[in-house]
Image: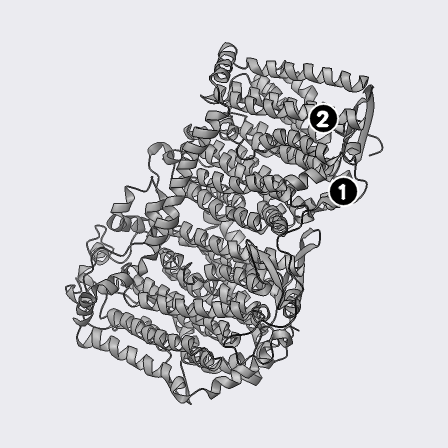
Amino acid sequence: MNGFPILSVMLAVPAIAAVACLFLSAQTARTTALAATLVNLALGVVLWLNFDVGGAQWQFVENAPLFGRFGWALGIDGYALLLIALSVFLMPICIGASWHAIEKRVPEYMSAFLFTEVLMIGTFAAQDIFLFYIFFEAGLIPMFLIIGIWGGANRIYASYKFFLYTLLGSLLMFIAMLYMSITANTTSIPVLMAYDFPAHVQTWLWLAFFASFAVKMPMWPVHTWLPDAHVQAPTAGSVILAGVLLKLGGYGFLRFSLPMFPEASAQLTPLIFGLSAVAVIYTSLVALVQADMKKLIAYSSVAHMAIVTIGLFAFNAQGIEGAMMVMLGHGLVSGALFLCVGVIYDRLHTREIARYGGLAINMPRYAIFFLLFTMASIGLPGTSNFVGEILSLMGAYQVSTWTALLCTTGIILGAAYMLYLYRRVVFGEIKSDEVRAMSDLSGRELWLLAPIAAVVLWMGVYPESFLAPMRKDTQVLLARINRAQPAGDSKPTRGTGIIPSAHAEPAHDNPASGEAH
Amino acid sequence: MHSILFIVFLPLVAAAIAGLGNRSLGVVPAKVITTGALFVSCLLSWPIFIGYLSGSAEATVTPVLHFITSGTFDVSWALRVDALTAVMLVVITSVSALVHLYSWGYMAEDPDQPRFFAYLCLFTFAMLMLVTADNLIQMFFGWEGVGLASYLLIGFWFRKPSANAAAIKAFVVNRVGDLGFMLGIFGTYLVFNTVSIPAILAAAPSMAGSTIGFLWFRADTMTVLCLLLFVGAMGKSAQLGLHTWLPDAMEGPTPVSALIHAATMVTAGVFMVCRLSPMFETSPTALGFVTFIGAATCLFAATIGTTQTDIKRVIAYSTCSQLGYMFFAAGVGAYGAAMFHLFTHAFFKALLFLGAGSVIHAMHHEQDMRYYGGLRKEIPVTFWAMLLGTLAITGVGIYGIGGFAGYHSKDAIIEVSWAAGSPVASMVGVFAALLTSFYSWRLMFLTFWGKPRWAASKHIQHAIHDAHGHGHDHAGDQAHAADHEVHEHGKQAEHHHGDVAHEDAGHTPRVETRGFNEIPVGTGGYHPHESPLPMLIPLIVLSIGAVAAGFTFHGWFIEPDAGERFWKGAIAFNEHLMHSMHEVPLLVKLSATIVMLTGLLIAWASYIRSPSTPAKAADTFQPIYRFLLNKWYIDELYNFLFVRPAFAIGRLLWHKGDEGTIDRFGPNGSAWLVQVGSRVAGRVQTGYVYTYAFVMLIGLTAAVTWAIAG
């Protein structure tokens, strides 16, 4: 890119637009926000096209010393590229989803969203540990505001819960970062990623980061803020929360916990596996009995994120790349599912599942999109989530067959709660006149859902586009953490080539070997 | 060999056009495009099959697109064609094309036809992807794709609660099998470091005798892998334990039952075992399990089939039972015989289902055989077609000369399992053949013989007293189905917003258990009509298959020399075993024919000669009769063991876990925190956010200063 500071520009565009929005009228603010996010999407495409797949680990590096060792250090690898791409892709869709739904304090709302975008991109692009911290923690402030101001009836409780959980985690992480920067005498993330902390220190540092990332993830049992936050957030808030904010925890594990504390990661893998396996079964069963659509999808997110964590801590390529694919896929699919909920919420103003039914009759186009995203959420092959889930679970199987078995039950339970949801909302007879009066997708709504649908299918059929940028990073990461890799529980022995004594098989004088050629 | 690309992808294109175009495309274009695509696929498939029959064709792999690469895990989309695939290709495309054509007539009054045809085409595409898979992941893609299509088609009449419940049940029960399949794939990759099928099969023999850790135990590697994969096969092929979805799947339109739930999708499990046969050959334990499950299902499903009164359910249990035959053939190592039965079964079972559909069509959607009777002369083409189908499934033939399709394939299974040293499986097969003959003839006698008992049928009354006065011509199946619902599901309807458990309990048999002979005789003035030509042509074509598929093809499928040349290593064809099949005692060879005649006699005696016998027998053996009528109470058992507990535990975890424990001791923990929280929140809506930001910034500034100073 010949030194063009594209990452800084991608931060500047929404930042400037966010400030500008505050001084504009509602309609102009909407247009400005949409324009800014579309510009960033275009920049994101440029970024991706110029990313040298398989080239240097860190690309588009910018480094401007501010004071002391603290600097404006940006740069991305493949993981960051993909997550930035996800963010800039979802942003215009969020603005579009808020076009008519938000009526009060529109300029402030648009501004909050644009700031979220700045902070998300900043988090993924930061190469300085404190710069990361600022973006990471500040990213939640606009979210508090979005839930607290534009949220539903019980928004105060929801944002309060969100706040409490987050505060606890970030304090511990902050102390750990402080310790690290002093001990290693650097604030550079790439340098820290190659720095070896003593094993007993690693454990404490790992736990401190874990406190923050587990909440963001969210992992069981610190997940209870998520359903409330989703239920109270406006549609676009839920989209960005599920689509991007939930990826911060996974990104944190990938960027900090694994490369910086490989021994501690290996040592605490059983903890991650245990919590994840519980999460899959626990939250799936809870999702099954929800009467509120958003709550159901929120609980399903917790289950999906558990698949991410087991993949990350599988210490192999399939697990890590699968975890990234689940993050991307889940970002798109759960975002789209929240949009689907938003579409009918805008018409009937309720999230209660029982009030709907029979939408396939008067909203056939909606039914198709909802079906696609439901199936993607279930992990049907040909959709984005399948690729991630199968890789992630396959990775986990190589370490722990128990974990793989327990987490794979998610495919059964996931099918049960999603199809049960779909059936109650879309199938059956129309039960009330207000439902009968609901109109099918408008042009605007179609434009929100169709691009996501296209990418979901693209990721499902040709995931190579998304796997290629991170392949190099995975190799680097594995080279770093291989020394701590836990042994799997399968340990197959070498075969003897002799088929174990057959019972009642006299006809097989020449076992199958002859047929295999 | 690029015709395979057209064979596989034409249905996908047609499905996309018809599905996305939907109503704006119009009914006729949608039907023409989808049906046309299938006939083209079918015409392209037969030359491939004939190529293998003549022995000139070689296995090919046509690469399509890169798929997933992650570490050493590498899979591509590719279309593999060998003898095994070729067999499946002709079965799938032929039956699918005929079912498309049949649906022109059967679905003529449905307003949603484009959607229906798009689903059928989508199914065909997924099934073709399954059988052309060169690696386990693509096979799983097809596996799930047919599951999706099956879900959509079972629930095609989405206004019916029972159809929706059946669709979900089919998907979820299949997913239980998929759990095994997925773990099997993971284990296979772990052991062989690849998921390419040829590579696995080549390496499998050398892994025999190895052990592997799985959960808490260590066991023979190949046994673990094969059993895990076989669990997937059990789900898709509705084998004992995971069979409960198949009878309920009859909620779908009858052409769907013929295509998906008889001829093709449910045989995917058998196909999988045959495709991986060199792998299964390395584990006698796994093969023993396959034999056991196959034989048990074969018998179990046949017993239930003898008591059901819904014509489609009888055929569904019959399918389940016939799949059992295929599995135990595979289990004893006779993969050729398993595939042969799959092949012939596809024709005669599709024929029986489509015939049943024709009867249902003629009887104004009455499916209860007790309200049929005497239809032989009213719908003669359907009658003859179903008669041929029945002769095929019961295995009518003369020793030394030949017979209908089932005579060749089923008898081969009974003989080969005897020859392979599994006399128990063989005898179970013989007994199941007795039951098969009985329930098949029972179906025929109740439907086509005797006196008409139509007058008592609610559906017929509905047709006659139709206020609009167009008797046979009712306004769309949806409306009708919904109407039907009121009669049959009144009790369930009131629950259907509440607990899914009620509906997933399965389609409970009708409460009234009157015997057919207690139903008043009379036509009620109703005149059944023979079905239109688009429905009759498929019946006629399939009849030819039911008559001729056996004696025409048995050489290539199961005879030692010709079979070896035909299969060319596509399955683990055991020439020696197929030889020894001919050396079994004469009694074994004749046993199937003997029990076939016995079954026919019993059915004739009970349903023609003295029609009061069945009711008397049911009274005498009341507990057994109830047990069978209620399908061994397996639905009730699963409901009690899994469905209800899942909901109850979910509720418990939500209220007692999340709300009662985590939130209580977490965020809502101390009164102090709650007070602070609400006070801050109450004062300024979002005041604490600023506090948070402020604290964070102060801390950060301090930290940065510290870091710089240090």
Q: Quadrant of the C terminus of chain A?
A: bottom right
| Image location of residue A133, percent across then percent down | 69, 24
Front position in the image: A149 or A368: A149
Q: Quadrant of the N terminus of chain A?
A: top right
Which residue does the numbered mark 1 point to in the structure image?
A: A480
Check the residue under mark 2 and report the chain it is in: A
Residue at figure coordinates x 33%, y 33% from the top left: A433
Front position in the image: A333 or A396: A396
Q: Quadrant of residue B460?
A: bottom left
Answer left or right for A507 relative to B448: right
Tell me the amino acid under the disc marked 2: Met
Q: Few, some or many C-alpha atoms within 10 Å of disc 2 (few <14, some 14-19, many ≥20)? A: many
Q: Is residue B230 above or below residue A381?
A: below
Q: Few, some or many C-alpha atoms within 10 Å of disc 1 (few <14, some 14-19, many ≥20)? A: some
Q: How is the image coloured?
A: one colour
Tell me the amino acid under the disc marked 1: Arg
Answer left or right for B321 relative to B191: left
Which residue does the numbered mark 2 point to in the structure image?
A: A177
